[in-house]
Amino acid sequence: MSHHVLLVEDSSLVTDALRTLFEQTGRRVSVAPTVSAAVEACVGDMPDLVLLDLTLPDGDGLSLFDELKSRGLTPTTVVAMTGHDDPRVRARCLEAGCREVLVKPVSIRELLRRVDAWVGV
């Protein structure tokens, strides 16, 4: 069974690159460019892993947790991705429920290693 990864990211450059990477490594990939699209994607098919950008057109990516909780849904593993290496941002993400916080740009090798660990490969 292939693991389902949801990329919550509004940059098509980033999502195109990550989609290609994950599909080449046998994962099923969905993309949501907004918080509302991510909620709908999770309602229809809860992913094994959510890679969550914090700055989205319709708000703070962390609001995804509140939106899902209001629908009685709990994502399995959410990892925040941010361009800001700020301890306050990291703390907010972990308090919200993120398993980890990655600072962009992320090494491809490191990302794949961590994804394998997060989804239990």
Image (cartoon, grey):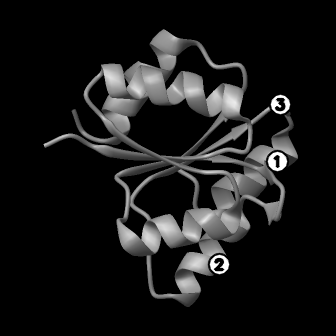
**Residue 26, quarter of picture:** top left
Disc 1, SS? helix
Find residue 43 and name its label: none
Q: Quadrant of the C terminus?
A: top left
- Measured in 3D between alpha carbons, the distance from the residue under mark 3 to the one under mark 1, in whole angstroms, is 8 Å
In the displayed structure, 29 sits above or below 17; it is: below
Amino acid of disc 1: Val
Measured from the top left, where is residue 10 in percent x and y?
A: 73, 44
Instruction: State which tag comes first along the sequence, 3 or 2.
Output: 2
Residue under the point 74% across and 36% down: 11
Answer yes or no: is residue 81 visible.
yes
Disc 2, SS? helix
- Measured in 3D between alpha carbons, the distance from the residue under mark 2 to the one under mark 1, in whole angstroms, is 17 Å
Amino acid of disc 2: Asp
Front tag of 3 and 2 = 2
Residue under the point 61% across and 65% down: 37
What residue is shown with label 3? Answer: 85
Q: Quadrant of the N terminus?
A: top left
What residue is shown with label 1? Answer: 89
> Pointer 1: residues within 10 angstroms few (<14), some, or many (20+)?
some
Measured from the top left, where is residue 12 in percent x and y?
A: 68, 34
Answer yes or no: is residue 74 visible.
no
Amino acid of disc 3: Asp
**Residue 114, quarter of picture:** top left
User: Pointer 2 and pointer 1: residues touching (CB < 8 Å)?
Assistant: no
Measured from the top left, where is residue 41 in percent x and y?
A: 48, 65
Q: Is residue 8 left or right of residue 21?
A: right
Residue under the point 35% across and 27% down: 23
Instruction: State which tag comes first along the sequence, 2 or 1.
Output: 2
What residue is shown with label 2? Answer: 66
